[in-house]
Amino acid sequence: MRPDEVLPKVRAIIHEAALLALPFFRQGERTTARVWNKSGGSPVTEADVTVDAFLKVRLSELLPGAAWLSEETRDDPVRLAHDLVWIVDPIDGTRAFLSGDPDWSIAVALLAHGEPVLGHVAAPVTATLYEAVAGQGATKDGVPIRVSAQAGVAGARVTGPKPMADRIERRLGLGETPGALVRLPRIPSLALRLVRVAEGLVDVGLVSSDARDWDLAGADLILREAGGAVVGLDGRPPVYNRREPIHGELIAVPEALRAEVLAGLG
């Protein structure tokens, strides 16, 4: 089954998953879901687990030969030998979700031979869906999207860790207005941070070290198909489905800004 044939079926599954998560969310208030901490101290909610279990069943039924990697499922190294792998974050931005911030998402990617060929990022609170199929462009609610036409880093709209933005300004000598970066509010969901670069609302998305495959893979494809890139400080794109699916510092940018942003962080 080709990725474009899978696309509408995955869309429908994600819509159902969003309907499972939304009853637990209260905008501006604490979630009604049960909350506990994982071994590393990060929070997980009843909604994370519910959505994860639903997606695992439904996506595995859709492509029985695909392996699975998710934030909320015990990792099975069998995925390393599979050509097809689902990469899933059932709720990206759990802290936002549990505190009533609407900037959380459901992120799904399908890898083929290590490369994302299908990407979905849903923002259930606003009923927004970003999608991409490799080689076929990216859309937001069915409408094609494209990265911004920002030509230089001076005056660029940036979101992400403050220390990384400070490094760029310092190393590129952008400390004086109007040369300074335009600092946008932090976007809790990393997947949403990347797709907002894809749709041109953000010029530079910065990502601190320790991001995982499930935070990145779906949004990475959407950004690529919209004319942008996610790369490490060595200029190389992330490698997915490794034994340890962890990444160093990354940038998400239109291709036109890649070299200058890297120079500011190098």
Image (cartoon, grey):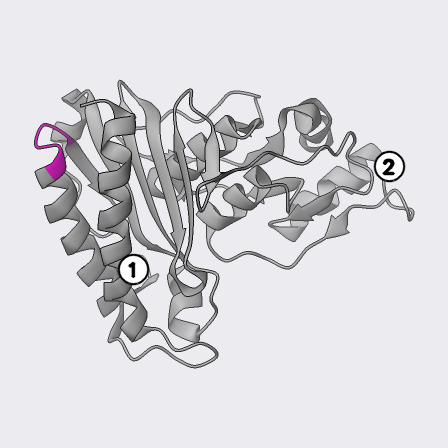
Quarter-wise, where is residue 18 in the image?
A: bottom left
Vertical comparison of 251 with 74: above or below: above
Residue 194 at x, y percent in the picture = 52, 42
Quarter-wise, where is residue 49 in the image?
A: bottom left
Q: Is residue 147 left or right of residue 107?
A: right
Specify which label sits upstream in the sequence, 1 or 2. Answer: 1
- Secondary structure under the numbered disc 2 in the rendered image: loop
Q: Give residue 18's mark.
A: 1
What's drawn in magenta, residue-wise?
62-66
3D distance between C-alphas at marks 1 and 2: 44 Å
The C terminus is located in which quarter? top right
Residue 10 at x, y percent in the picture = 25, 41
Residue located beneath label 2 in the image: 173
Q: Nearest to the eye among marks 1 and 2: give it.
A: 1
> Is 63 included in the stretch rendered in magenta?
yes
Residue 181 at x, y percent in the picture = 78, 46
> Is 108 included in the stretch rendered in magenta?
no
Crowd class of label 1 (few under 14; some 14 to 19; many from 20; radius 10 Å): many
Query: In the depicted view, which residue is nearer to us: 132 or 234?
Result: 132
Quarter-wise, where is residue 184 in the image?
A: bottom right
Residue at x-position 16% and y-position 22%: 82
Residue at x-position 18% and y-position 37%: 68
Residue 1 at x, y percent in the picture = 17, 23
